[in-house]
Amino acid sequence: MSRVQIRMPNLGAEAETGRVAAWLAGVGQVIAVGEVVAELETDKATVEFEAPVAGRIVEIAQPAGVDVKIGDVLAVVEVD
Amino acid sequence: MKPPMSGAASHEYPDHLAPLDYPNVRAVDPTAQEWQSTPRDVLGRALLILTVVRMVERWLVDHVDLVHGPLHSSIGQEAVGVGAALALEPADQITSTHRAHHHVLGKQIAGHLPPGFDPFAAASLPDAVLGAVGRTLAEILGLAHGLAGGRGGSMHLADVDAGVLGTTGIVGGGIPIAAGAALAARLRGRSSVAVSFLGDGATSIGAFHEGISLARTWRLPAIFIVENNLYSVATTVRETAGFDDLVIRAAGQDMPGILVDGMDPVAVMRAVQLARSYVVAGHAPVLIEARTYRFYHQNGPLPGSAYRYRTKSEEQAWALRDPFTVLPQRLLSAGLASPDEISHVTGLAEGLVARAVALCTTAGPTGPQVPEGHYPSISTILDGVLGPGLPPVEAALLNQEPDPETPEVTFVAAISGTMARWLERDPDVFVMGEEVGHMGGGAFGATRDALAAYPERVLSTPICENGFAGAALGAAFAGMHPIVELMYPDFILEAADQLFNHIAKARYMYGGGRPIPIVLRTRTAQGRGYGPQHSCDPAALFGLFPGWRIAAPSNPAEYVGLFNAAMLTRDPVLIIEDHRLWPLRSRLPLAGYDHVLPLRSARIVRSGTDVTVLAWSHAVGRVTAIADRLLERGIAAEVLDPRWLDWSGFDREGLQQSVEKTGSLVIVEDATFSHSIGGQLIDRALPDLFPHLRTAPIRVTGVDVPTPVSRPLEAHALLRDDSIEAAIVAGARRSGPARRGGAL
């Protein structure tokens, strides 16, 4: 078992921060690659965020509605 | 004009290519049989180029953090660039837009593959392909070994050897430029064509209509390809045009229009082949609308639906038509290529892109990174705004002594004679502007000699200043040396996009090494009652844009020398011609119409010790007469004509030497105060002059109003002798010790 940090992606050239508009998955939930786990937004755009890895969410590092810098950890997933 | 391609295809159109009920406009949609009869090596090249473009852009989207600035990917639209590239010859030239990676890479790769190259069978790709892809990727990343040394980036790509004249970040900007490249092909008797790629949004901008009007009226070998991806940023075609089929804009120009499926490289290739054969024959240009879709938003890594102007279901429907998946599927299902062959071509593309990436990045802890050493050195930042100046000139041509053996010539005869001399000397020189080929010498007689001897290179244009200014740039890109006349300087604002966003910046933003030889003549008209829209002095406006030289000749001999220097620099040069000088006569120097006045060579018209008076163009004569009168009052003014007004050509040392002597400076110019370049010159020169000045510099200009028409109002608003005299007296009075206790 190892833990993988999921980070805030770059949502476009103009924005240096983004937000989680809503978490669609929570701690303890098992997720698959490509599963939509959150909605992310900037001042301009809203995008569905698909899980880049499969595993079980063990930590949500950023609550919804808080500005997060690109590259900061959003969640931690335990993978096989 | 008759449509060249009469008759519609007999099969049914898919919904997105519904038959068009307009004259001169048709759809090109190859039948399955036609599609499959495409030579297999051509299909292989389509697959190869398409795959390379997609992989390069996929990599860029995945590493968007390495791209400084917006990334306008063509993902989804590649078939347009690929199909066009396969239909064009290596000598054909293209201009394009902010979304140009597919056009540039397509033209480069197609041109670097030898004729008949079959990617299905080839073991490797030519080195030139890697070189071109590597330099393009490097430019997108802003690296020193990029096409433009990192100055231009993604939106400003040029690779002249591959026929990529330049891509532009200004919507529509490339359209008149392509018309100019096509004009150059026509004037030089070449059989190449020029293609301008443009977006759907560009069909509403003036440059679209001006550039196409030029190409249509002269029947130039140009193809305009509207890449209609349905949205200008988030605004639909319905909102920008009011109708869906942009191709019908061709009907208004009485030129053929072709609608084609922009998701199918073979269809696009056939449409461009058809258009190419038509335009090369000299019938008329052709407008192609390629209907396509960008899978991402305007720029960046998100789909358009993230910004809510289009739906996910629409995106999913278009994704089913993705050429990146459809093309290989179609090759397989038609039995034109085996799975192994498809894999082979994909492998060639993968290997190429991996090597191109390796030319630009190294492996870092979290992925690829750009080594600092790949970025351009700060020490190069000033290089290449302009060319290096004059080439070596024989001493005899620099001799300014008047030739006593020849008669005096008028100012207008000097303009006319000098231009004709250049047309005689260099077949790549031509003259272009409104009316220049009519009335025996244009609106003001300046093209008389040129027209008499070389009428085929004196081109009267439609009234489209931005169009023919851009065409001048296109012709210059293609190797010619246009002389452009703008009838009145105020019309410069009509051409502002091409003059300032394109011509001024082109040399620098495309890497600094490519000359932009253009001479722009304009005739000022102060004092003739032409009023607020025909009386401006353009010097200060051009002074705002590095990349232009500015010459302001004051008599016929000076005109010849400055014009020749302007041509010899092979830079963009504005020459300001004051209409009041037209009848002025002077003798030419011994070298006659070949004599040259160097840059940074101010002329001391009158030597004096009390005050330096800087004046140029028509003001030189007025100031000199006033200075002569003031001698009787014991004031010895030094009249200095800088000849060149741009800071690169301005004789700062000459000015400093004069001010060291006089301790006082007056600048006299025929402009309203707001349009005065004197402020720019003082601002730049003051650090050197300040230790020598005993008083603040004085600027004499017109009154700060739009020039009124009424005779007395105009006379008061323009530069006046009494203002000049008062300023010289004031400057002298407040100047150095020589004046203390003097006659004043």
Image (tube, rainbow, N blue to C red):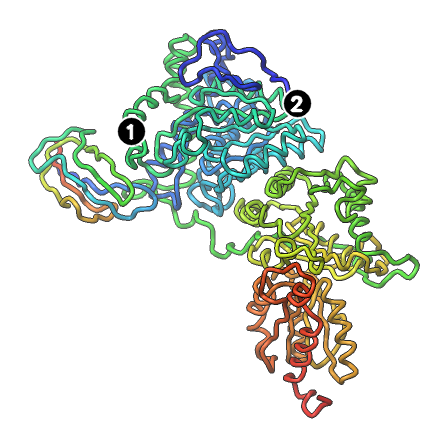
| Residue beneath disc 1 | B311
Residue B313 in percent (x, y) is at 28, 24
Residue nearer the viewer, B60 or B402: B402
Residue B636 in percent (x, y) is at 74, 80
Are the residues flagged by discs 2 and 1 from a single subunit? yes
For this orientation, the residue located farthest to the bottom is: B741
Disc with the residue nearer the chain's start (2 vs 1): 2
- Element type at mark 2: loop
Lateral position of residue B17 relative to residue A32, left or right = right
For this orientation, the residue located farthest to the right is: B405
- Number of numbered callouts drawn: 2
User: Is B658 drawn above or below residue B393 in the view shown?
Assistant: below
- The amino acid marked with disc number 2 is His
Q: Tell which subunit mark 1 falls on.
A: B
- The amino acid marked with disc number 1 is Thr
Residue B350 in percent (x, y) is at 39, 27
Which residue does the image show at 30% across and 37% down from the upper left? B307
Q: Is residue B424 visible?
A: no
Mark sitting on residue B594? none
Task: Please tell me how crowded label 2 is: few (under 14), some (14-19), or many (20+) other residues with Cα within 10 Å.
Answer: many
Tags 2 and 1 touching, CB below 8 Å = no
Which residue does the image show at 58% across and 79% down from the upper left? B691
- Element type at mark 1: loop
Q: Is residue B23 visible?
A: yes
| Residue beneath disc 2 | B283
Q: Tell which subunit mark 2 falls on.
A: B
Which residue does the image show at 55% across and 29% down from the upper left? B224
Residue B508 in percent (x, y) is at 55, 49
User: Is B634 drawn above or below residue B267 in the view shown?
Assistant: below
Residue nearer the viewer, B621 or B658: B621
Q: CA distance from mark 2 to mark 1?
A: 43 Å
User: Is B629 drawn above or below residue B489 in the view shown?
Assistant: below
